[in-house]
Structures are given as C-alpha cells and as structure tokens.
Image: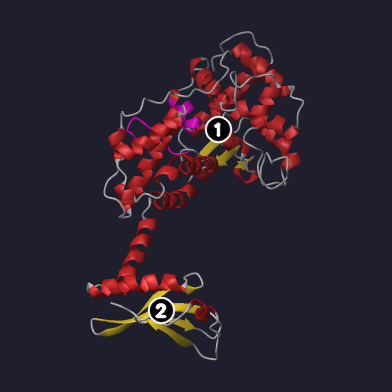
Amino acid sequence: MATTDKLSAPAVKNALAKDKAYKLADGGGMYLMVNPDGSKYWRMGYRFAGKQKTLALGVYPDVTLSGARVKRDDARKLLANDVDPAMLKQITKRTKHASAENSFEAVAREWYVKFSGKWVPSHGEKIIRRLERDLFPWLGKRPIAEITAPELLAVLRRIESRGALDTAHRAHQNCGQVFRYAIATGRAERDPSPDLRGAMPPAKETHYPAITDPKAIGDLLRAIRGYKGGFIVGCALRLAPLLFVRPGELRQAEWSEINFDTAEWHIPASKMKMDVAHIVPLATQSLAVLREIQAMTGDDKYVFPGARLNGKPMSENTVNMALRTLGYTKEELTGHGFRAMARTLLDEVLAYRVDWIEHQLAHAVKDPNGRAYNRTAHLPQRREMMQGWANYLDKLAAGATVLTFKKA
C-alpha cells in the first residue's frame, strides 16, 4: 500500500484558482480539488466492487496536507479489508445523528415542546428549568434506551443530597413522562423510573401558611382594605380572599374572561393547573371591585397589568410582597393561603358541601360514579356558596365577634 506523495504544503497553499476547477494529484488516489472561487477540497478516488467512487477527506486549510494523507491511508486500509470507506462514513454519520436524536435531552425537549402548550406557563417554566438544571447535565447526552434505573437513581440522589427532596420526586415524575414518550415514539422499550419506587424517602407534604381563625381573618380583611400601596395591587388583594383562585390565575386574569352580565369569570384550560377550563362565580362584592379597577385597566388585556406596562400581567410575587407590607410574614400567610382559608371555613364554619368547595378550588374532584366533574358542575350551588362566602367575609371585616356563621 505504499504511495508516492507528490504535493508539498507550499504548493497546496499557493495553488491559485482558475476559470475551471482542476486537480492536483498527491498519491494513492488522493488529490486537491481547486475550485474557481478559490475553495480547496481534499478528495480520494478509488474503485470498489467494480465501481469508481470518490471519498471526501475534508476542506483545506481546516484539513492540512498531512491530515488528508492520514485519512487517505486509513481509507486504503479499509479497502484492503474489503470495506467501502465512503459507505462506512455514511453509516457512521447516520449513527451519530440517530444517537443525538435519541438522546435523553433530545427526547425530553421534544416531549416538552409537544405538551407544554397545554400547561400553565409558570408550570412549564418550572419543568424546563428542572430538566436543564438537574437532569440534562448528567443524562442529556445518554441514549435514552440505554439509561438504567441505577443510573437514574444516582442523578435523583444528587438532587436529594442538596436537601431538595420534593424536587427529586418531581424530577422522577418528569423522567417517567419522558421515558413513556420515548416508548410511544419507538426510541425506547421500557421506562426504568417505576423501578425506583421506594428508593427515595417520601416527600413531605407542603402546606401553604394560612389564617383560619375567624377573628384573625377579620383583622386581615381590615388591613387589606386599608392598604396604602398601588390601587391595582390593592384590588388584587381585595379579590384574593373573595375568589380564592391560585395566585397565578388571579394575576393573569384577562378582561375578555370576565362576564359582568352573567357574573362569571371563565378561566381557559391553558391557564389551569389541571388543564380543565374553570368558572368562578362572581359575588356582588367581587363585581364591585372589578368595576372599580375596570375604570383604570379596562383598556388593557390584563385586569392586573404589570407596573412596567410591557403587555404582561403583574409579577408573581406582587401579592406576597403586599402582604409583607401589611405586616404578615411568609410563615403566616401567602397568596396561596387564601385557598386554605376558604377551604377550611366553607367546610367547618359555613357547612357547605365538600364537593362543591373542592370543585370551586379546581381540584380533581370526581362524582360517586368516578367521573370528573365538568366546569359547570353544581354551578348554581357554587354561585350561592360564593355569595355566602363574600357575605361572611364582610361580617368578619365589620368586626363580628361570633366565630361561626352558619349559612341560611
């Protein structure tokens, strides 16, 4: 397989373009193709199975003369063993491309793009941040079909070791979703995540701080009504206990979703945690607050636009920061705590049916036959309940001393 090299580095460097492409032969079938635009390509001509073929060896100067000769010699060794170097190169390229497409990160990002459009934006942001921070650095480049349960556990324990046990469990859940998507799209045969059940300690249930003592609620409502901050934030504070929706749902409320004629707020599924459209009946007190703020923000998209006037709603921490200015610490109350407040008192004090309450909280409630309630389930009863709740809050704000107030 000895070759007689003819070119020199200076000759390659100084080869000038001509009107037509031309070749400068080196040896062993290798040559430099010089194009009219001045570009230079290394090529190797050879015969395999009775056919004349060409193998690309690289572009000059990225591939030097000596580098091209190494590639040529490797190709000649393959030919000596009846292997077509061009075919091998194509197969290798396809394998690398398929490997990249079938990596955990590639499949996870494809899964995210496919399903994130149906999630509340804040939920989607948390998931992609979790994937990028806690999973991709260690699993991202691995072919998803080759990831084992012990390998996945090692990554999850890395999260657990920094004290983020709840995040580790959520990452475990996300991995299962990605693996199942990989199986459905033919890029994996099994999901190793169920093998890890019991391998990590259970996550502690998170309870948002809330105020459930009626007298303390009265103090809170009076503090809210005396809020000295911005008018828009003050209105959001006043509506938070009346509507007890999730903070993200409240701050992203749009005027197009509010119907003053039917006294209803229709929240689309895309904004709901459970991906199911939701109806919030509006008591007269809620309508009054909305009419107040409509005079200021009615021409905007959002009921509570952000302070920067950039077409976005107010930030997710606005209500919590307002509560801090009222003197309530994060250990005492958060925006999410109004939900627990309503859940407790509507049940234990006002004695409304639990399924009405749970449905109004937009929880995954099912009827006795196991069917999920739709958004209009028990709507007349929930409308009555929401008005009763608003009336009760008015009594507490007025300083009612009784701790119970049974509905009529």
Which residue was labeled with disc 1?
246
Q: Main secondary structure of the magenta part?
A: loop
Residue under the image location 54 percent in, 40 percent down: 122
SS of the residue under disc 1 = loop
**Kind of residue indicated by mark 2:** Arg
Query: Is the residue 317 above or below the residue 18 in the image?
Result: above
Residue under the image location 55 percent in, 91 percent down: 19
- Residue 331 is tagged as none
Where is residue 218? Give x, y as percent.
65, 15
Query: Is the residue 244 above or below the residue 273 in the image?
Result: above
Q: In this picture, which residue range is highlighted in magenta? A: 355-375
- Name the front one of labels 1 and 2: 2
- Check residue 160 for magenta coloring: no
Side of 360 where 49 appears, left or right: left
Say if residue 35 shows up in the picture.
Answer: yes
- Are there few (<14), some (14-19), or many (20+) residues within 10 Å of tag 1? some
Query: Residue 1 or 43: which is nearer the viewer?
Result: 1
Which residue was labeled with disc 2?
43
Query: Residue 387 or 158: which is nearer the viewer?
Result: 158
**Colour theme:** secondary structure
- Check residue 365 for magenta coloring: yes
**Dots 1, 2 in contact, CB < 8 A:** no
Query: Is the residue 13 above or below the residue 385 in the image?
Result: below
